[in-house]
Amino acid sequence: MRRTRFLAGGLAAGGLLSLTGSPVRAAGQTITLPFANGMRPIVAYPQKRPLILLTSRPPQLETPLAVFDEGDAFTPNDAFFVRWHLAGIPTSIDGDAFRINVHGAVERELSLSLGDLRRDFEPVEIAAVCQCSGNSRGYFSPRVPGGQWSNGAMGNAQWRGVRLGDVLKRAGIKAGAVQVRFNGLETPTLSTTPDFLKSLDVELAASPDVIVAYAMNGADLPLLNGFPVRLIVPGYFATYWVKMLDDVEVLTEPDQNFWMKTAYRIPTAGNGCISPGEKTETVPIGRMRVRSFITNLTDGQHVAAGSGQRLRGIAFDGGSGIERVDVSTDGGATWRAAKLNRDYGKYSFRRWETTFDAAAGQTYRLASRATAGDGSVQTTAVCWNPSGYLRNAIELVTVSVS
């Protein structure tokens, strides 16, 4: 199950999912993202439409922002972004043989098959945004190390699976347990590289919205997004959403592994946002912050003159829901409310739309500003920290009218 081969193409749904062949680079197609060294190839990986390639080993694929303007609030599976940490990724998994092992500080160790999950536990569904902690890192100034993502390291899906809390209840958590640690089939290629492990406090792990998902948007998970199952932690950054989840360990001490103690941490000072060179204590990254994007127009685009120019976008936060989205056509000098579309739940993208009058010869600086249910509001203040996390500033899109 942990053998590594070159990531390739093709698939078979059902019990066995395998990838054979080669990723296909769209002939001559590239995109230049609006920051230093922003040129990227467009590549079609197995089960995926052409996406923006950040790295190939491990695979990291970004969703073009225009995808978020398609259809409803859900990101198609074949366009959903891909982020792996380690190069050792299985390219063939037998879903019938797959097991999740639950052990540690539990009354009963469990070895659960996909059939066990579907048959023995109540199925649940939840709409939730999965966003990489480093989404938008490419816009940080001064520049910081790490994957230089634009704004497409995120996606929204309807996840189906079972409550992790129900699985833990079946195992029986012993007194004194403090955290639950998760591991997947992703492995390092060098012995000196730490395995990718993530942990949640017991209270969060057992909360009803955290699930072990075996389906997204009504279909099996794509292998690149974690087939057969992945952890879903709604409202939290994707670092906790462990893919190909096969090991759940209940701990009696806080997890001190590299990915908790050293990586994926934010400053305690400044609400996670500090000045370059400033030193501060850190804590593990947690919930996402309120964000919004314009999705149907791009920076530098020319639009036709006329009344009723449509403006559309998405908004989301870390789990309090979107209460309001305001838009500006003058760079934030004035604002007015946009119409919110269907609410799929407090963890989901919320689509919004409005119109504005586009006068010939004019230039418009468009912006959207989301307000969350907890009262948090996007601002023009740009967050900086040495890991390139937490960006949620108001984004400007400049269009000219001909």
Image (tube, rainbow, N blue to C red):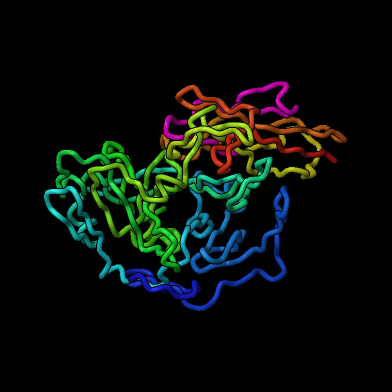
Please tell me whether residue 330 belongs to the stretch shown in magenta: yes
Q: Which residue sits at x=51%, y=60%?
A: 78
Q: Quadrant of the N terminus?
A: bottom left
Q: Residue at 81% x, 37% y: name it.
A: 305
Q: Residue furthest bottom?
A: 21
Q: Is residue 121 above or below residue 331?
A: below
Q: Is residue 337 left or right of residue 78?
A: right
Residue 343 in sight here: no
Name the image quarter holding residue 113: bottom left
Is 273 on the left or on the right of 186, as rendered?
right
Range of residues picked out in magenta: 313-337
Farthest right residue? 361
The one of 251 and 164 positioned closer to us in this rendering: 251
Please state the horizontal and vertical placement of residue 383, each as a whole percent of the image.
60, 33
The location of residue 12, given as percent across then percent down, is: 40, 73
Q: Which is more toward the observer, 35 or 47?
A: 35
Q: Position of residue 149 (x, y in %)?
A: 61, 50
